[in-house]
Image: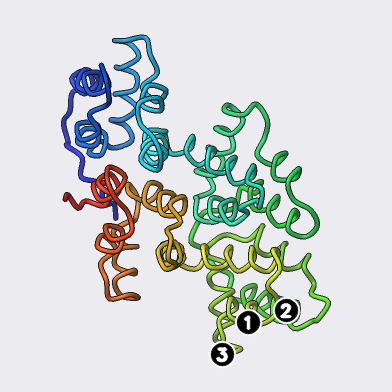
Amino acid sequence: MASLIAPSKHNPIEDAEALQRAVKGWGADEKAIIAILGHRNGTQRTQIRQAYYDLYQEDLIKRLESELSGDFERAMYRWILEPAEREALLANIALKNANMNYHVIVEISCVSSPDELFIVRRAYHNRYKRCLEEDVATNTTGHLRQLLLGLVSSFKYGGSEVNARLAQHEADTLHEAIKNKNHNHEEVIRILTTRSKTQLVATFNRYRDDHGIAITKKLLDEGSDDFHKAVRIAISCINDHSKYYEKVLRNAMESDGTDEDALTRVIVTRAEKDLEDIKKVYYKRNSVHLEHAVAKKTSADYKKFLLTLMGKEE
């Protein structure tokens, strides 16, 4: 369920003209920019970008990039992009990061539907003139590389059919692979990168029922290297991505500082999808409304923009 409140009818030309007034002259009118773009859905934002270009022969994204700054600029930039463009950008930023934020690659691969992931890969081609798989392979090694390549390159079955016998067999296979001190990583990678989401959920449930512990908790006991972390993230995203995103948000705001990149990533990418569900999970886990937590940890236009995307006006 989405949080975004967008008008059913809008005039992209009028919006483009209002945005041009907001960025014209000395200093931008951030309030006006948020009032317009913070209340437009993906289709409407694309129409506004096209109308702005037709009217002023200028890319709205580049103009806003030059007029805004800091966390607000980065959030707005990500918001205006079409979803596949945005995911491609996030993947590229993650891969270029000195510490290689592989969790973002896992998120995109495991939360997206097969069709969505295919479109993201195509957007990556168009934007960076190379394939996502190439950049993943260049920036990783060993079993982590095998896992990530398998996740980003697969086009899984997206239906709801489940093979109960296969779930039992592969739950046993995962149990043996985890129990084995040498770890049969290839079998774990094969199962996670080839089975459908519904089949994997059935396998994870079978594992929990048979062994009395969630597979993610068992993996937590067995290892904390990058490969094990990536496997846990993949399983969490496949099992219940709302719970996973709640944890990302909680971790982003738990420390003395704030992880603005993670905060922006979740709110911007989920605002038109299931942010309402994530907000409910957050409240259930923390007894605090997500909007209140975000308001406490952010400030100025960045705060106003995130709250707008969450359907909460100041």
C-beta proximity under 8 Å, tags 3 and 1: no
Q: CA distance from mark 2 to mark 3?
A: 15 Å
Element marked by disc 2 = helix
The image quadrant that residue 15 belongs to is: top left
In the foreground, 19 or 284: 19
Give the labeled residue for mark 3.
212
In the foreground, 59 or 105: 59
Rendered position, 157 above or below 63: below
* Position of residue 134 measured from the top left corner of the image (x, y, whole percent): 72, 39
Amino acid residing under circle 2? Ile
| Badge 3 or badge 1: first in the primary sequence | 3
Give the labeled residue for mark 1.
218
Amino acid residing under circle 3? Gly
Q: Is residue 228 left or right of residue 247?
A: right
Q: Which residue lies most toward the right here?
A: 182
In the foreground, 182 or 176: 182
The image quadrant that residue 170 belongs to is: bottom right
**Which circle marks residue 178 in the picture?**
2
- 3 vs 1, front mark: 1
The residue that appears at 63% across and 76% down in the rendered structure is 165
**Which circle marks residue 137 in the picture?**
none
Badge 3 crowding class, 10 Å Cα cut-off, few under 14, some 14 to 19, many 20 or more, is few
* Position of residue 174 measured from the top left corner of the image (x, y, whole percent): 69, 76
C-beta proximity under 8 Å, tags 1 and 2: yes
| Badge 2 or badge 3: first in the primary sequence | 2
Q: CA distance from mark 1 to mark 2?
A: 8 Å
Element marked by disc 3 = loop
| Badge 1 or badge 2: first in the primary sequence | 2
In the foreground, 305 or 134: 305
The residue that appears at 50% across and 55% down in the rendered structure is 111
Element marked by disc 1 = helix
